Image (tube, rainbow, N blue to C red):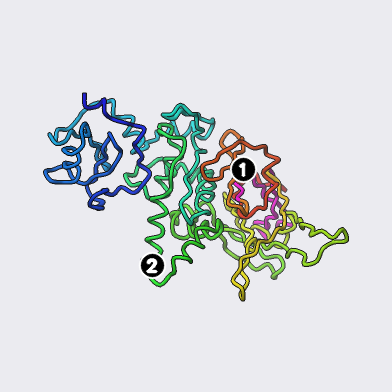
Amino acid sequence: YLLSFVNRHLLDFDFEKRCSVSLVKDNCYCCLTCGQFFAGRGSKTPAYTHALERENHRVFMHLENGRAYSLPENVEILDKSLDDIRKVLFPKFTSEEIARLEKEATWSKALDGTEYLVGVVGLNRVENARGVNCVIQSLARVDKLRNSFLTTTTTTNDTLQSLCQRIWNKHNFRGHTSPDSFVRKLRKQIKLANPDKLETDVDALFNDPFATLRHFLTFVVPKKHVDDLFRGELLMLNQKNKTQPFVFVPLKLPDAPLFRDVMEKNAIPQVSLAELLKPFALKTAPEYLILAFVNRFSKNQFTKEVSKNPTIVTFPVKNLKIASSPSSSSEKTTSTVSYDLLANVDAAGKATVKHVDGTWYETNDLFVGEVLAQQVTLGEAYVQIYERQQRTQK
């Protein structure tokens, strides 16, 4: 009868796995009645005391191995009815499920009856981390990075891998998840590496989508995946064909006009992405191309105020053609590499992402809504991720 007191609506494994009484992280259990975390199982431990003090709070699950116990009797519970909780705590994906995720959109139902699209779920906004959610949603579109994360299991919930697994888990109790523990870990790592770094500087880092993405590619995403998926080599056509390795291509927007036009209005300038890419050619084309409009925001050196460049960039959703240098000196024909857009992050921190079925969704923290492909190009683009098409055109 103890299992009748399990309350799945209160279970939330997105946050840091730490005892709510002693604050230790080792050997923690979750009370399946109230959802709180407690350390230990033996006599006089926080979990044991909680089971004695609270009526019917008797079933506890270990947060590292998923084994369930009845306290204070300290008897293991072997019951298949708790497997759905383990599927939320430890998401696992078979090769067949991963292959299915690549081909078709999967809808699932949360405990409250609402349906959510697996792979495009809302993310809780963490305070002073506006740029984190949009970067996570964008990187979750890179299928080879996602598949690498899904094929291996993890018992922690503070890594990009575990967060990606929760986003693509069809067994979730809710249609959203939280990067809270992940962001906490990133902040701790930065403070340990740079003790003198001010908290305001860390906030500025995670509030800027481009700075957040650059930090992810440097410290979070495994170097092997960065090299295999994003690293390429540019040919600088206006610098005597100088070559430059890159992980993302930095593009500079034209400055906004200082004066009003003849209609006494401040005209918003527009520039095509093809125009910005003219000075470059791809010597080594990466499988996934990241473009960053690095001067979308700029800080005044005297007033320290941050100003936004309102220039609108026009870009294609499909068939972005970029010049490619000939593979040998004997080739004289200019070839192009074609890319299709996967994700577009605008200056407001919203990510518009392409799902596996070709449908576009605008994600803004907890909000997820379907949009037309024509609407993707309307915002002030800040960071973009493109996927290379299979064939190189001449």
User: Which residue sits furthest top?
Assistant: 1
Q: Is 380 on the left-hand or right-hand side of 148?
A: right
Magenta stretch in the rendered image: 318-345
**Picture residue at 77% right of the left edge, 67% below the top:** 258
Closer to viewer: mark 1 or mark 2: 2
Residue 304: x and y in percent read 59, 71
- The label number, if any, that marks residue 390 in the structure image: 1
User: What secondary structure is found at the residue carrying circle 2?
Assistant: helix
Is residue 125 toward the left or the right of residue 53 in the image?
Answer: right
Q: Is residue 174 visible?
A: yes
Give amino acid for label 2. Ala
Q: Nearer the viewer, residue 273 or 71?
A: 71
In the rendered view, tell whether residue 175 sits above or below residue 28: above
Q: Residue pushed farthest right? A: 262
* Quadrant where the N terminus is found in the figure: top left
Res 110 quadrant in image:
top left
Of 243 and 155, nearer the camera is 155
Task: Identify the mark nearer the N-term, 1 or 2.
Answer: 2
Residue 121 horizontal side relative to residue 88, left or right: right
Measuring from the top left, give residue 266's x and y in whole percent.
79, 60
Q: Is the residue under label 2 in contact with that under label 1 (CB below 8 Å)?
A: no
Q: Which mark is residue 286?
A: none
At horizontal 87% and vertical 58% (from top left) the residue drawn is 263
Mark 1, secondary structure of its residue: loop
226 falls in the magenta region: no
**Residue type, numbered disc 1:** Gln
How far apart are labels 1 and 2 at the CA level?
A: 41 Å
Queried whether the magenta region covers residue 321, the answer comes back as: yes
Q: Position of residue 3 (x, y in %)?
A: 24, 27
Query: In this figure, which residue is indicated by the disc labeled 2?
Result: 193
